[in-house]
């Protein structure tokens, strides 16, 4: 999370600093309209740059994933940038359009526009000025469309398959807004550092938008497969699905996840891989809980022999550290990455002492027997917390069960609220932030 916050804040600070090298918030003379002019430029720069970086992040670059410590973190940054673009673009729109309304209502008096001789302007600058009316008109409508699409993306109740489709339309709105920016950005910016950054981000965002619109994102990381076996645990409302994948799948590390498409209309959904990779078997196992609209229908849709597409692997929740001890906390379906790691350790034993805490409100004897067998084979000390009878898992319970917790790293996957509680409590007790690892796994 630190890298995420630093990246987000650093981007906004750098953009602001570079803009201040080219302009000022205190123009002379300082009037409503002179401030409006520079503020529109500033908010426009922040909005389009934030949207450009958000668009670039949709490419799911492996290099960026490593820098931000996981695709889940990239998607969190993507969300923050989307909200930033929404807020600043609303400010941009209001100062541009709202001022015109206030002039029309008689609240403000617009100063006389300075006339300029077209002959005295460079050819390119005059060409841009000739397109201003068009850029303003299409930019306003693109702003309305982008605002609706971003708001829909933030509404969790909006169905995922519809979210996926309409969210891709943002790529079209982005291209229009990129044209709007190109024409209406103050011409003097282009020869300064802020102009160079805007130009680079516009190029990167435009390329990303084209790849999104043509369905090319993640194309080089896709493999075809078929459903090999299905096991349903009624009391847990969980499906265990094993998929045979072809040789396009290059393997994965325990704790990583993949996007799986079993129905084209529904699109790809992210699922944590619950198996260690064996190059001879070429199989992937996914454990999915019936939580949403699509996952609740998976049991009726999935059939042995059904063709699927798997894209990945993604994620940096890979259990890699040098601590002598690790504490794993898998709450509910968050147990999945730990299952994969235990299957790996059963084949390639490690030297770290590991305590796994699995908190669940549901119980299935067959599933728990499998979990216990995996823990035993991996040399992992399993702590099962059935919340109806044992109560909620708390930081105090973990510390009581693991006396040497101060020398351990903590790996958490599960509901966000419990993760926040554990992070805050353990960091307050002295565990460094670098030793707390959490899979955010929130892709919208």
Image (cartoon, rainbow, N blue to C red):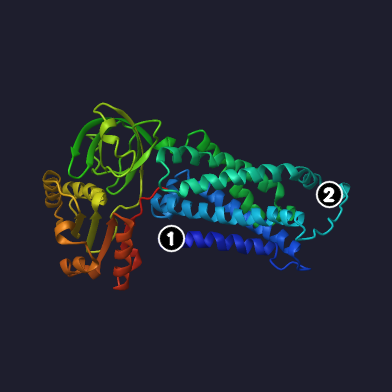
State which quarter of the image contains the N terminus: bottom left
Q: Residue furthest bottom?
A: 429
User: Which of 436 and 271 lies nearest the eye of the viewer?
Assistant: 271
Q: Quadrant of residue 278?
A: top left
In percent of width and height, residue 209 lies at: 55, 40
Q: Residue at x 63, y 45 (%)?
A: 177
The relative height of residue 184 versus residue 434 in the rendered view (above or below) is above
The relative height of residue 184 versus residue 407 in the rendered view (above or below) is above
Q: In screen coordinates, is 381 left or right of 328?
A: left
In percent of width and height, residue 181 lies at: 66, 48
Determine the secondary structure under disc 1.
helix
Q: Quadrant of residue 288?
A: top left
Q: Residue at x 34, y 40 (%)?
A: 293
Residue position marked by numbered label 1 in the rendering: 3
Q: Quadrant of residue 233?
A: top left
Q: Is residue 370 visible?
A: yes
Residue position marked by numbered label 2 in the rendering: 121
Q: In screen coordinates, is 345 left or right of 432?
A: left
Q: In screen coordinates, is 1 left or right of 391?
A: right
Determine the secondary structure under disc 2.
loop
The relative height of residue 421 versus residue 229 in the rendered view (above or below) is below
């Amino acid at each position: 999370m630190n890298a995420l916050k630093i990246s987000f804040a650093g981007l906004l600070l750098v953009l602001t600093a570079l803009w201040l090298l080219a302009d000022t918030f205190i123009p002379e003379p300082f009037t409503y309209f002179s401030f409006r002019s520079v503020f529109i430029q500033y908010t426009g720069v922040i909005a389009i740059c934030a949207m450009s970086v958000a668009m670039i992040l949709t490419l799911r670059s492996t290099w960026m994933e490593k820098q931000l410590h996981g695709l889940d973190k990239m998607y969190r940054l993507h969300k923050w940038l989307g909200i930033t673009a929404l807020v600043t673009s609303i400010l941009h729109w209001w100062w541009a359009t709202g001022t015109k309304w206030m002039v029309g209502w008689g609240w403000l008096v617009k100063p006389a526009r300075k006339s300029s001789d077209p002959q005295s302007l460079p050819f390119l600058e005059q060409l841009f000025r000739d397109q201003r009316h068009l850029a303003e008109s299409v930019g306003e409508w693109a702003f309305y469309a982008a605002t609706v699409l971003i708001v829909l993306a933030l509404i969790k109740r909006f169905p995922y398959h519809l979210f996926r489709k309409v969210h891709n339309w943002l790529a079209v709105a982005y291209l229009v807004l990129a044209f709007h920016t190109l024409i209406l950005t103050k011409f003097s910016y282009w020869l300064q550092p802020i102009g160079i950054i805007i130009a680079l981000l516009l190029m990167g965002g435009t390329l990303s938008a084209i790849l999104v619109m043509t369905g090319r994102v993640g194309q080089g990381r896709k493999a075809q497969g078929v459903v090999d076996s299905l096991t349903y645990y009624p009391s847990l409302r969980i499906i265990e699905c094993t998929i045979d994948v072809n040789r396009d799948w290059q393997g994965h590390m325990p704790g990583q996840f993949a996007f799986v498409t079993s129905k084209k209309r529904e699109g790809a959904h992210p699922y944590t891989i619950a198996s260690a990779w064996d190059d001879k078997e070429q199989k992937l196992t996914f454990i999915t809980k019936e939580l949403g609209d699509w996952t609740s229908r998976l049991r009726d849709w999935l059939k042995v022999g059904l063709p699927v597409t798997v894209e990945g692997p993604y994620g940096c929740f890979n259990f890699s550290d040098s601590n002598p001890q690790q504490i794993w906390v898998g709450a509910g379906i968050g147990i999945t990455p730990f299952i994969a790691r235990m299957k790996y350790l059963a084949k390639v034993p490690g030297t770290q002492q590991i305590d796994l805490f699995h908190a669940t409100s549901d119980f299935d004897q067959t599933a728990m027997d499998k979990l216990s067998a995996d823990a035993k084979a991996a040399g992992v000390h399993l702590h099962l917390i059935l919340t109806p009878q044992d109560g909620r898992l708390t930081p105090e319970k973990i510390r009581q069960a693991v006396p040497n917790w101060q020398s351990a790293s903590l790996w958490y996957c599960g509901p966000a609220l419990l993760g926040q509680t554990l992070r805050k409590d353990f960091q307050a007790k002295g565990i460094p932030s670098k030793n707390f690892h959490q899979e955010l796994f929130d892709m919208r």
